[in-house]
Structure formats: C-alpha cells, structure tokens
Amino acid sequence: MKALIDTNVVAYLLFGTEAFADEARACLEQVETATLCQGALLRAIESGVSADDTLFVELAVRSACQLATFDKAVLKAFSEVARRPESRVSNDHARVPSSREGAI
C-alpha cells in the first residue's frame, strides 16, 4: 500500500497519542516542495485551504495515493484524496514534503 501522511499524523505517531502509534512506523521519504508549489498554490486559491496544507494534497494527487491527515479543512475540501487515518497505519512508501528548499 502506498500512502502519503501529513505532518500532523507524524506528530501523533512520534508522541504516541493515537492508538495506532505503536504499530505504525512509516519509512519517510523527503520530497522537495519546489516541484509542487504551482499546483499547491492553485489548489489553495480554489479551496481556501492553506498552501502548506495543499502541498500534501498536490503530492498525493501526483503520486496517485491517499493522503492521511487529521486536518478538518483538508478532509472537507479534498475528500477524494484525503482520509482520516484508520486505527492502524503501516506503509513502506510514505512521503513527506521537505521544507528545506522551495518552501512557501
């Protein structure tokens, strides 16, 4: 299974605040945000969701995978791609945008 996880999900995992934290250990791959900015900005303008959140949406769409997030605005605006994590998340190919280069 290929999935994209939002940073709020990573925080829950790291702090062990969700039931699935003990079971969920994703292999994270960084992705430079510079390649995602135009699409993310267009999605932000169209949806009213912040551009930093739409970076995750843009990456999920380009990667043809679901976005796991707790963000209510993202879940509402992008229901076709965004999902609230289930009680168990396990993934070898999770991707997180890097803010090192090309951050907005």
Image (cartoon, rainbow, N blue to C red):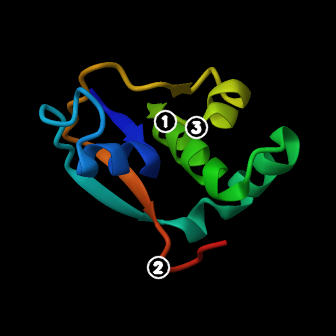
What amino acid is found at the position of numbered circle 1 in the picture?
Answer: Thr
- The answer to whether mark 1 and mark 3 are in CB contact below 8 A is yes
Disc 1 vs disc 2: which is toward the camera?
Answer: 1
Task: Give residue 70's position: percent from left, percent from top.
Answer: 51, 34
Q: Residue flagged by tag 3: what amino acid is it?
A: Asp
Where residue 71 is drawn, which disc sits there? 3
For residue 77, the mark is none
How far is mark 1 from mark 3, CA to CA?
A: 5 Å
Residue 100's disc is 2
Vertical relation: 65 (above or below) 56:
above
Residue that appears at 67% across and 29% down? 78
Label 1 environment density (alpha carbons within 10 Å; few <14, some 14–19, many ≥20):
many
Instruction: Indicate the secondary structure of the residue bearing disc 2.
Output: loop
The C terminus lies in quadrant: bottom right
Classed neighbour count for the residue bearing mark 3: other residues with Cα under 10 Å, few (<14), some (14–19), many (≥20): some
The residue at which mark 1 appears reads as: 69
Q: Amino acid at mark 2?
A: Arg
Q: Using the image as rendered, state which of residue 14 and residue 37 is in the foreground.
A: 14
Q: Residue at x 76, y 57 (%)?
A: 41
